[in-house]
Structures are given as C-alpha cells and as structure tokens.
Amino acid sequence: MPEPTHILHLTERSMWDAARENGVYRVSTRDRTLEQEGFVHCSTRAQLPAVAAFLYGSYEGPDDLLVLVVDPARLDVPVRYEAPEPGAEEFPRVYGPIPVGAVVGVEPWR
C-alpha cells in the first residue's frame, strides 16, 4: 500500500503550542483564524518555499516557524485542492479544525 500523501501547514511555534493544549489547530494562515477564512491554508512540499516567502517576506522567515505535516486520512473534515483565483495554482485547503492527532510530524522551517 503506498504511503498517504501528506499536506503541510506553515505556522509559528506559539500557535502550535496552543493547539497542542486545546487538542485542535484553528489557525488558517498568518494573523487569520479558521473562522475568519473558512478553511486552513495548506500546501504541498514543493509549494512551501513560495508560501513562506509570501507570508513572511523571505524564504526563511522567523526563527520559530514550524511545518505541520498533516495526514488527510486522519481528518474528519473535507480537504479540497483549490486555486486562490481562476487559473492559479491549486493549494490544499482544510475545511475545518485540524485535530492534533492528524499532525504526524512537526519540522523546523529553515
């Protein structure tokens, strides 16, 4: 059986620490919540450098950035690949909170 395809979410350590305390992750993107956006922004590994540059103004970003590795099979909410505008590249979006148990890896972003 092939390994499941994981999706990634770039976040700050303090946001991940809060999620671990609460049991769910509810941040959509930098300075925006799931409730404000309607979904959690995610990416593939290939998309991650451009996402970091867009959100944090540089490839590297702050020292406390983490990459959450999410297994979509462990989610009970929809994951859809959608473009932010017509004709643009599609990114995975998680339409609901991400349970801490769906995060199968946490990597430092450098």
Image (cartoon, helix red, strand yellow):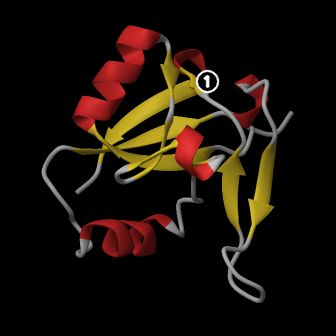
Point out residue 37 in the picture as x, y percentages from the top left corner: 58, 51
> Which image quarter holds the N terminus?
top right
Pick out the residue farthest to the left.
Answer: 63
Pick out the residue farthest to the front.
Answer: 36
Which residue bears the numbered disc 1? 102
The answer to whether residue 105 is above or below residue 38 is above
Along the horizontal axis of the image, is 98 left or right of 49? Answer: right
Q: Residue at x 72, y 71 (%)?
A: 90
Q: Residue at x 57, y 39 (%)?
A: 35
User: Can you tell which quarter of the image residue 70 is in?
Assistant: top right
User: Can you tell which quarter of the image residue 44 is in?
Assistant: bottom right
The answer to whether residue 67 is above or below residue 24 is below
Q: Which residue is drawn at 35% across and 40% down?
A: 107
> Which image quarter holds the C terminus?
bottom left
Point out residue 73 in the picture as x, y percentages from the top left corner: 78, 29
Along the horizontal axis of the image, is 93 left or right of 19? Answer: right
Along the horizontal axis of the image, is 86 left or right of 47? Answer: right
| Closest to the observer, 54 or 46 | 54
The answer to whether residue 18 is above or below residue 60 is above
Point out residue 43 in the picture as x, y percentages from the top left corner: 57, 58
Q: What residue type is labelled 1?
A: Ala
